[in-house]
Image: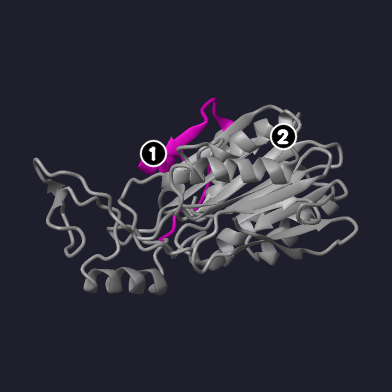
């Protein structure tokens, strides 16, 4: 999970004038791109796609788009999804290679196939067949990150201690270690290794769309799929209730479907702030030291956010834009 979010709303724990946009993290240009689409009369799906795409081009925080978060092989791969809250259609891709516009490919899956989710090399071939340009996603920066990681004996990584060689000291390849009692491993948390651009757009009529894009966790195991591209985990939209999006440690967060949970809570009458906090609390019950946040918005224009407090992470920032503001405004919420 790791993550940004973009909603179309106005004030944290407040009320926005429809239509509106909001996104996690201080990614102003992504918010502006989405808001400009709505101002020009574009659809909420167009807004979500263009907002996420802007972050892919800008390589927001190094955790979205090409040239970031190389995996154990040094390759950057992308995850993305988009959801139509009117029809409940979803398009998603994961482990996407060679294609920079991951959110565009996700929308192509939704619009041009009866499927929901394509992954890996087959997703890349689908994208090329749909007219997307194949390009090398490696940059000098991502190559430098990977080279340094190898020099540091592949630290940190996502292997448990029940493999050989010892993953806390050595690079792979790894094999299972027989008859070893599993002990809980402690990973150093990098709050910039799990960011996601997650967008929620609410139109003038209250219709909702949501989307995400990320290059996943830094040094992930090849083939890993995080929460961002999973409907209900990374984001969820339902025009009868609202939308939500999550950012953070996707391997943990996806187990709880926090975005789906938050939307269902709003459906039963919970205000967005309470819905977000309950979704975070559900995860904290099992993983008190997880890194993550959720943003929620309902169809009346109310919104809220919540995050899990950790050393070095006591506030969660997001951007908001609506008609009265007409420009992206940076907002934040205290973590608990």
Picture disc at residue 122: 1
Q: Magenta stretch: give its range.
A: 110-136
Against 324, is 285 above or below? above
Residue 137 lies within the magenta run = no
The 10 Å Cα crowd at callout 1, few under 14, some 14 to 19, many 20 or more, is some
**Alpha carbon distance from label 2 to label 1:** 37 Å
Helix, strand or loop status at disc 2: helix
Against 316, is 296 above or below? above
In the rendered structure, the answer to whether residue 10 lies left or right of residue 306 reads right
In the rendered structure, the answer to whether residue 166 lies left or right of residue 159 reads left
- Residue 49 shows in the view: no
Against 317, is 205 above or below? above
Residue at position x 39%, y 60% in the image: 218
Residue at position x 49%, y 55% in the image: 291
Against 284, is 197 above or below? below
The one of 5 and 67 positioned closer to us in this rendering: 5
The one of 335 and 291 positioned closer to us in this rendering: 335
The one of 228 and 128 positioned closer to us in this rendering: 228
Residue 116 lies within the magenta run = yes
**Could you tell me residue 157's position as x and y percent?**
29, 59
Helix, strand or loop status at disc 1: helix
Residue at position x 50%, y 46% in the image: 284
Q: How is the image coloured?
A: one colour
Picture disc at residue 266: 2
**Could you tell me residue 136's position as x and y percent?**
40, 61
In the rendered structure, the answer to whether residue 82 lies left or right of residue 8 reads left
In primary-sequence order, the first of circles 2 and 1 is 1
- Residue 124 shows in the view: yes
**Could you tell me residue 277's position as x and y percent?**
63, 45
Position of the C terminus, as image quadrant, is bottom right
**Could you tell me residue 258's position as x and y percent?**
56, 40
């Amino acid at each position: 999970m790791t993550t940004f979010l973009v909603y179309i709303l106005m004030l944290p724990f407040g009320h926005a004038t429809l239509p509106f946009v909001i996104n996690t993290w201080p990614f102003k240009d992504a918010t502006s791109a989405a808001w400009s689409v709505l101002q020009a009369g574009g659809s909420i799906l167009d807004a979500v796609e263009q907002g996420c795409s802007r972050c892919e081009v800008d390589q927001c925080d190094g955790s979205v788009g090409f040239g970031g978060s190389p995996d154990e092989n040094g390759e950057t791969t992308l995850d993305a999804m988009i959801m139509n809250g009117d029809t409940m259609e979803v398009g998603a891709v994961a482990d996407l290679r060679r294609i920079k516009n991951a959110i565009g490919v996700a929308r192509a899956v939704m619009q041009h196939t009866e499927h929901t989710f394509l992954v890996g090399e087959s997703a890349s071939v689908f994208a090329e067949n749909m007219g997307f340009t194949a390009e090398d996603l490696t940059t000098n920066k991502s190559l430098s990150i990977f080279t340094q990681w190898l020099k540091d004996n592949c630290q940190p990584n996502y292997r448990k201690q029940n493999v050989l060689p010892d993953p806390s000291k050595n690079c792979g390849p790894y094999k299972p270690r027989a008859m070893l009692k599993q002990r809980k491993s402690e990973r150093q948390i990098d709050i910039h290794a799990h960011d996601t651009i997650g967008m929620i757009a609410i139109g003038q009529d209250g219709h909702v769309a949501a989307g995400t894009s990320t290059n996943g966790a830094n040094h992930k195991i090849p083939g890993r799929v995080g929460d961002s591209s999973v409907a209900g985990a990374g984001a969820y939209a339902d025009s009868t209730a609202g939308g939500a999006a999550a950012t953070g440690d996707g391997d943990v967060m996806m187990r709880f479907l926090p975005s789906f949970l938050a939307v269902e809570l709003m459906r039963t009458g919970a205000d967005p702030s309470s819905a977000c906090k309950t979704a975070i609390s559900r995860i904290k019950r099992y993983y008190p030291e997880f890194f993550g946040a959720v943003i929620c918005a309902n169809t009346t224009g109310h919104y809220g956010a919540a995050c899990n407090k950790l050393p070095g992470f006591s506030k969660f920032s997001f951007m908001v834009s609506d008609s009265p503001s007409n420009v992206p405004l940076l907002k934040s919420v205290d973590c608990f």
